[in-house]
Structures are given as structure tokens and as C-alpha cells.
Image (tube, helix red, strand yellow):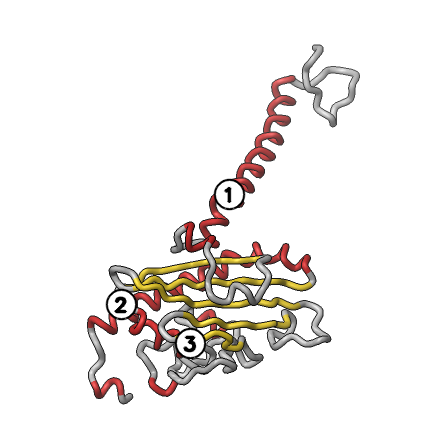
Amino acid sequence: MAGRLRCPDQPTSGRNPPSRLCDDRSMTGRGRALALAGAVVAYSGVVRPWLRGWGASRDEVEGGLPGDDLVPDRYRTTHGVTIACPPSDVWPWLVQMGYRRGGWYSYDRLERAMGAGDFAEGGSARRIVPQLQGLAVGDTVGLSAAGGPLVVGLDPQRSLVLHYRMDLVTAGEASKRSRAILDWTWAFVLKPTDVGCQLLVRVRANPRPSWLGLLLPALEPVHFLMERKMLQTLKQRIEASIQHPPLASEEAI
């Protein structure tokens, strides 16, 4: 019958299969294509912006923060959390972050599995550690034994900016011989609010060669989960420490 779809694997002569079967097969293929296209659009338009801007307002996502001038904006995320404490209570927890320091307040087991979980107190700090409060511009905040970013911005109780040109093969500092480089910044910014403060964390990255940028979206879910856990843990531990401060004997341990 004219206008009917014919199954491609059937001969033109002889008896044709039911036209309804051919139409169903064709529609199934179309349906899958439409579903895939819809999923891509939904991820790009809804899920991905949410992953990249969790906890931050639109103005905070689009606005400037300390350290923005250090790395071209080829990739960026801005996450945030509100903490019911003033910046002065949050700042010491940020200063002590790092490998062989106070940790990252994220998934400690995963950090250990990645070789980045050697922390001063066995896991991410649950208190302010006095001996880890010394931090200055030019210091290295280790990510692992391979190295880590430099402190390039330090405005007490306001912002801490880290910068690292990382060799993606060795995870160490990039050199002239490095073929895959991720030049990135990690900024921690405190903004006072009526209930305490807002902690914003921004990552800016410029991969080299540029085609490496195509791989960054695949890493977004992992980065999001790790950084969200960091912010949630900081909020929980800082607020708990203010409500139930440790005894003098506990602080000395």
C-alpha cells in the first residue's frame, strides 16, 4: 500500500509483514532518539546548572569573587552554604584545611583511597587545631603527597584563594614538559549575613590543551558530591562547636 513504511530487512517481492509491525519498529527508534535528545537538553539546561551552582544564588554564581582574575574562565563552579556563625568562627576551620593538615571535611574514606587522606588527626578535623592555624601567602596547601596549590590570596575572615598549575598525569606541579595541564583556582569566600555568614566556594579552571575541557563535564558529578559534602560537614561541625564548645581538657588532646 502506498505510503506505508517497509521493513528494511524484508525483500520487496513476496508477502510483506504487517505494516503495523514496521511502523512500531520505526516509532521505537524515533522514541529512543527523542528520549535521548530530551535527556541531553534536561541535563544541559537544568541538572548541570544546578550541579555547578548548588547553594549559591544567581547573583553569586554570576558575580565576581576574589581570585577570578588569575585563571581564564573556561570552566567555573560556585557552591555555597549558610552557616549560623560569624566569619570569625568559620575562618579557623578553613585555614587548617589540607593534606597532612586538617583534611577536606569530605568523604575521608574516598580521600584515603585516592591517596589524599593522610590527615593530622586521622580524619578531617572535628575541632580547631591550634598548631595548624599558621598560614601565609606563598604556603602550599597539599592535595596529596604529589603537591598542591599555593596560597595566593589571604584576607582573614573574608577570603582564602588557592592557585595550582597541575600536571594531570602526575598530580604534581606542572612544568615545561607537562603535556596535560589544569590551571585552576579554588576560592573560599565568607560573606556576613543576618544569621551568620555565607561560605562560597568557587573553582575556575583552564585546561591545556583546550580539548581537555571536553572531559570536565564528566567529572562534575564527582566534584559536586565531594564539595557539597565538604560544605555540609563544615556547617555541621562549626555550628555544633559553637553550641557545644569542647572542654579545656578536650582542647589539649
Q: How much space separates mark 3 and mark 2, taking CA atoms?
A: 19 Å
- Residue hosting label 1: 45
Task: Tell me the quadrant of the picture where the C terminus can be found.
Answer: bottom left
- Residue hosting label 2: 85
Helix, strand or loop at disc 1?
Answer: helix
Q: Amino acid at mark 3?
A: Met
Mark 1 vs 3, N-terminal side: 1
User: Dot 3: within a 10 Å radius of its alpha carbon, few (fewer than 14), some, or many (20 or more) residues?
Assistant: many
Q: Amino acid at mark 1?
A: Gly
Tally the numbered discs.
3
Q: Residue furthest top?
A: 1
Helix, strand or loop at disc 2?
Answer: loop
Which residue corresponds to the image point at 23% horizontal and 72% vertical from the top-left?
242
Q: How much space separates mark 1 and mark 3, taking CA atoms?
A: 34 Å
- Residue hosting label 3: 97
Pointer 1 and pointer 3: residues touching (CB < 8 Å)? no
Which mark's residue is nearer the viewer, 1 or 2? 2
Is residue 108 visible in the rendered image? The answer is: no
Counting from the top left corner in percent of width and height, residue 16 is at 71, 17
Q: Is residue 44 above or below residue 38?
A: below
Counting from the top left corner in percent of width and height, residue 92 is at 35, 77
